[in-house]
Image: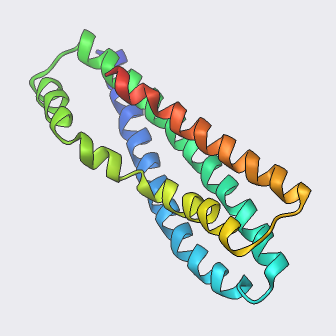
Amino acid sequence: MNEYESLRNEVIARIKILHHQISLAVTLSFLFIFGFIIFYTNHEALIIYLLALPVVFYLLTFNYQANQMTMEAAAYHIMKKHTSNWDKFYGEYKKGVRITSFLKVLPFFFTPIFCLIYLPIVASLSKTENIFYIIDWVLLALVIYNFRYKFKR
């Protein structure tokens, strides 16, 4: 029973972390708008801002994914070893709200995708900036690929 309580407490702690990370992503998205307005008149600063900002979101998303995977592994272990009525109910309930689970991670993607789409429209990038632009796309692909654990349920 001690293992059960320990794992359950870890799941609860990680859920709190996940909600804080989602709130942080939403807050950063709003701050992005202010930064965009501030840097809009300085073309070179805007390019650097739009290249750097997605990396901040990717790092936040990688951390979110790591916490989510660990939390889900602990919850799965609890469900297999110590099945209670609540665990069974909630496991089945979560299957029906997958779209909500997807929507809650959109703040992690909105700003980076906006930056990556908007940047080539407003600027012609130097060779170095193009390298960073490609790195941003590669990191986006890695973030999307890293969500594959969601399909293993």
Question: What quarter of the picture does the N terminus occupy?
Answer: top left
133 in relation to 144, above or below: below
- Which residue occupies the foreground of this view, 120 or 69? 120
- Which residue occupies the foreground of this view, 12 or 98? 98
* Residue 57 locus on image (x, y percent): 60, 55
146 in relation to 125, above or below: above
56 in relation to 15, above or below: below
Give residue 138's quadrant in the image. Answer: top right
Q: Is residue 150 left or right of residue 54?
A: left
- Which residue occupies the foreground of this view, 65 or 37? 37
* Residue 92 locus on image (x, y percent): 14, 28
121 in relation to 141, above or below: below
Say whether residue 7 is visible: no
* Residue 142 locus on image (x, y percent): 61, 36
Q: Residue at x 53, y 69 (%)?
A: 29
* Residue 105 locus on image (x, y percent): 42, 50
Say whether residue 1 is visible: yes
Q: Residue at x 31, y 22 (%)?
A: 153
Q: Residue at x 41, y 30 (%)?
A: 71
